[in-house]
Amino acid sequence: MKKVDLLLSNALIVTQDEKRSILPESSIVISGNRIVAIGPSNQIDAQFAAEKTIDLRGKIVFPGLINTHDHLFQVATKGLGEDMAVQDWVTVVTAPTAAQQTPEDIYTVCLTGCLELIHSGVTSVIDMNYMAYTFGLHDENIHALVDSGLRSIYTSIISDYGLQYGIPDYLMRPTDWFIDQYEQLIAKYPPTDRLAVWVAIGAPWTVSGEGLDKALAFSKRTGTPMVMHIGENWVDNHCSLDRFGMNSVPYLEKIGFLRPELLAIHCVTLDDEDIELFRKYNVKVSYNPVSNMYLGNGIPQMMKMQAVGLRIGLGVDGAGSNNSQDMIETMKVAALLQKVAAKNASVVNAQQILDWATLGGAKILGLEDQIGSLEVGKQADLFVIAANSAKVVPIHDPVATLVYSCGQENVEMTIANGVILMQDKVIQHLDEPEILRKCQEMSLALADRCGSNSKVKRSWKGNQA
């Protein structure tokens, strides 16, 4: 018998392989961080001597979910920016928070966000910090990502422009300053299959023409992918017309910004011409439906983007424009928003949503040969749903159950890179109650310190949990 580390037995396994195979009463065998066998339990189990065996009878295993957009530091702002337009929300809540947070703050609040991601079956995340006014903010954000156990991409926004459009001057620096920060980050944190640094720009209207050129040149020189909010709302095109006499996506094409190494976030205002340009240059897209609704920005044409073959992933976005980090909730909203926009319930199905949340995200990360499905040779990233609540029973189709019935409360286990991060709903490697206590305390103090607490309208303002 071959010795292995972990045997998950007797589960219903949703593989997300090329055939979208679903395997009843089956096992996954894990050695190190790899899946070494998968198949019927009555054939597989006797072949291996596992250090740990877990019987998952009556439970469902899915590939780990991939969150393609987040601002984890915004966990500190949950509930502060209710019912505000995005420009006001940035000015009153998120920008002051970014400017006033300490390295200790950002570690705790980012780690809290990662805990919720783990509870909702996420195993990979692309995080976008705002401007880090000390390098320690970069370090502690990355420290939180590493300690969480999630596969992570870290980015930090470049902004040298936009005072007239509402960008606070304290979040701006010359582009060369940001490029120097990125030089240091990439030297200190060279890319691995667990952590990489990418380049981020807030939006086309937050960077000068010279800044866009310099950021693009840096990305090409270092081979570092880029992330940018594009078409989140009407502001992109308004400002681009004001500055350049053309809409933002055609302008980005003009300066050579559209390319396969670009991940575009939101894409709410993209028209048919924009979508065709994205197709032409194979731009990747992160769909953030809860945030799009929360801020009243609109509905992106995801089904048109899907039809032309764009690589699409899902994102929860920051907790400031979502109030949760629940990826399973995001999947349901992703489907419903497209259905209501089309006034057609059949425009998208649960399988398509799961594809975006797994295989689509893997393609965005450039790791489709490593993650996104449960297959021999791939990394062991997965989560387990327990069919033990009225919320999910009865189950007729496990994929539909996940997308339309489940919530993070139904996730029982999450494994990333072969490591059990959560079992029986209990985080295994971190003191979750203590982290939550610190997050509550720090977030209240931070809201007072940055002035957000006194500027937002709330029905109740307390000074303790």
Image (tube, helix red, strand yellow):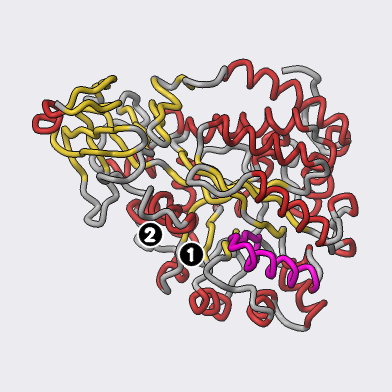
Dot 1 or dot 2: first in sequence order is 1
> Which quadrant does the C terminus fall into?
top right
| Residue at far front of view | 187
Identify the residue position indicated by label 1 in the image: 302
- Relative to 191, 49 lies left or right: left
Q: CA distance from mark 1 to mark 2?
A: 10 Å
The magenta segment is 210-230
Query: Is there a contact, CB below 8 Å, between mark 1 and mark 2?
Result: yes
Residue in the image at 52% along x and 38% along y: 326
Callout 1: SS: helix
The answer to whether 230 is drawn above or below residue 167 in the figure is below
Q: Residue at x 65, y 40 (%)?
A: 72
Amino acid at pointer 2: Val
Q: Classify residue 2 as left or right of residue 266.
A: left
- Answer left or right for 368 relative to 232: left
Q: Which residue is mark 2?
A: 348
Residue 39, position as x, y percentages in the image:
16, 38
Provide the secondary structure element on which disc 2 rests: loop
Q: Main secondary structure of the magenta part?
A: helix
